[in-house]
Image (cartoon, rainbow, N blue to C red):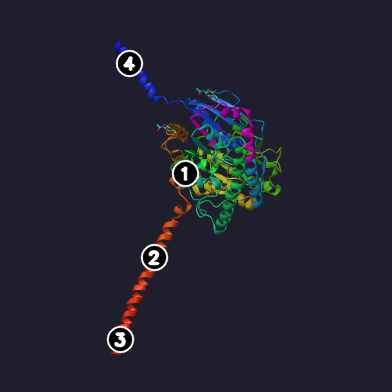
Amino acid sequence: MKVVILVISLCTLFLSIDKVQPLNILGIFPYAGKSHFFVFDKYLQELAHRGHNVTVISYFPRKEPLQNYHDISLAGKMNVLESVFSIYRSYWQIFRTSIFLFSSGTENCRVLLQDENVQNLWKTKAKFDLVVLEQFNSDCSLGLAYKLGAPVVALNSHVFLPWQYSRYGITYNPSYMPFHFFEGGSKPTFYQRVERTLFNAYFITAFKLFVQRVDQNTLAEYFDDIPPLEELAKDIKCLLSYTSLMLSGSNQFPTNVIEVGGYHVSQPKPLAESIRKFIEDSEHGVIYISFGSMLKANTTPKDKIEAIVGALSELPQRVLWKWEGKTLPGNPENIFISSWLPQNDVLAHPKVLAFFSHCGMLSTTEAIYHGVPVVGMPIFGDQPANAGFIEESGLGVQIQIGELTKDNLLDKFKTVLEPGFKSRVKLLSKAWHDRPMSPMDSAIYWTEAAARYSNFTFQNPSVKVPLYQYYGLDVLSFLVASSIIYLFIIFKIFSCLCKSKKSTRIKKKKQ
Ligand SMILES: *[C@@H]1O[C@H](CO)[C@@H](O)[C@H](O)[C@H]1NC(C)=O
Ligand SMILES: *[C@@H]1O[C@H](CO)[C@@H](O)[C@H](O)[C@H]1NC(C)=O
């Protein structure tokens, strides 16, 4: 009997050691971008799967219930962003993007705080062990997390935005660090460095003035004790950045920025019969084309469409094109168009040989996951930076919309369709998959750690160092001043010595 009791108690002991303490987690996702939430959704579901109690504020409530997962839905309170940008690039377009980012950021904040169910959280003094939130175009959620008294883990679904670097103690350097909105990657030209420097200053200043200040005022309508949002941002425990070494290259991140790029890609599902047959009956394989969910393919200038169709008609491959239009110029026989295609399942097919893409983070990630070479044509947001990653990692080549002609595009396709190119991409994909811990395990580990050890700071110490100390201005001034004093004293001593020598010489002469 005693033995049985001993065995039972040992078993329960082991079970309890193995079990992670379930956490009460609040997710705050006040931005209505579908492609962003797509990344976070996988992570939030996984937290629930692993036994944590997850409450999520977002525009995307679950269609089917999931155990441990609770929605606070903002659906219907703002338009969900899909197909809103046209295929076109200019400084004006970047400026418009910034206006869109700033105005939606402040609007998201107002909608979030006006919501009755969100208000109930602070009115009922709901207790959470942790808040996970998106870092994008507003810091409003940080104010809410502060009110609820929970430590914060932040998520990024893109390359750092200009105003994000300093809060993690990183100094942005335009000479070799990729810039969210521009091409040039880690080897920008002189012109690109000028461009980055100016736009970096613009974005940082405008974000502070037109978003942070406004959000701070919006929060002040509800609470009277919210510290400056920039200070709250510096207290974020860690940031889960949706990037990865083999694709985005080595970087300047401190240890509390964890790279978790890649976890959203799921096991491919069988393809619909018509698509499967189209791919498998091709003699020379298939090229897949998609410009994502945010770009309107039918706003592509007509000459550009003709150039694309022209280049494709000179290749022996068949083409699968995610295209909202009903037809293409010339109704080419080798092109299959559909307004929706299961991208991940298509890219997983071994006969899909190249991907013509706008270089969204999700598409880029799926391409490296499946080892499919990319021809990247970036349009807006972080796509130019991602296109830089594609080129520098060897995943593909890029073409700018301004230089898109039939011959240029044909050249690019021929480059990535070469067998040598393909085998290098396969090796790159293998290296990308090869990590000490899967990106999802890593994301979950750091999330749990942030709650478990919330009394410790994970922060990069440089965040709290005053600027004059960061740049060593006080030390430099001290050294310069003491050198001047030292030189002055030496000069004085010498001039005294000389004077006395001179006077002795004069005395000697007189004698
Ligand atoms: C889980 O979250 C829901 C919704 O926020 C809450 O009502 C419930 O009390 C939580 N459960 C636990 C065990 O904390
Ligand atoms: C952690 O910090 C909180 C708040 O500052 C404090 O009340 C608590 O005692 C600390 N816990 C430990 C284990 O130090």
Mark 3 element type: helix
Q: Label 3 belongs to which residue?
A: 507
Give the label on residue 483, or none: 2
Q: Quadrant of residue 337?
A: top right
The three-letter amino acid code for the residue at tag 3 is Lys
Q: Nearer the viewer, residue 497 or 388?
A: 497
Q: Label 1 belongs to which residue?
A: 246
The three-letter amino acid code for the residue at tag 2 is Ser
Mark 2 element type: helix
The quadrant in which the C terminus is found is bottom left
Q: Nearer the viewer, residue 15 or 415?
A: 15
Q: Which label sits in the foreground, 4 or 2?
A: 2
Q: Label 4 belongs to which residue?
A: 7
Chain part drawn in magenta: 106-133
Quick check: is 168 in the magenta stretch?
Answer: no
Tell me how many marks there are: 4
Query: Can you give x and y, in whole percent of width and height, for residue 391 in the image?
Result: 53, 49
The three-letter amino acid code for the residue at tag 1 is Met
Quick check: is 128 in the magenta stretch?
Answer: yes
Up the image or down, 488 lies above or below 440; here it is below
| Badge 4 or badge 1: first in the primary sequence | 4
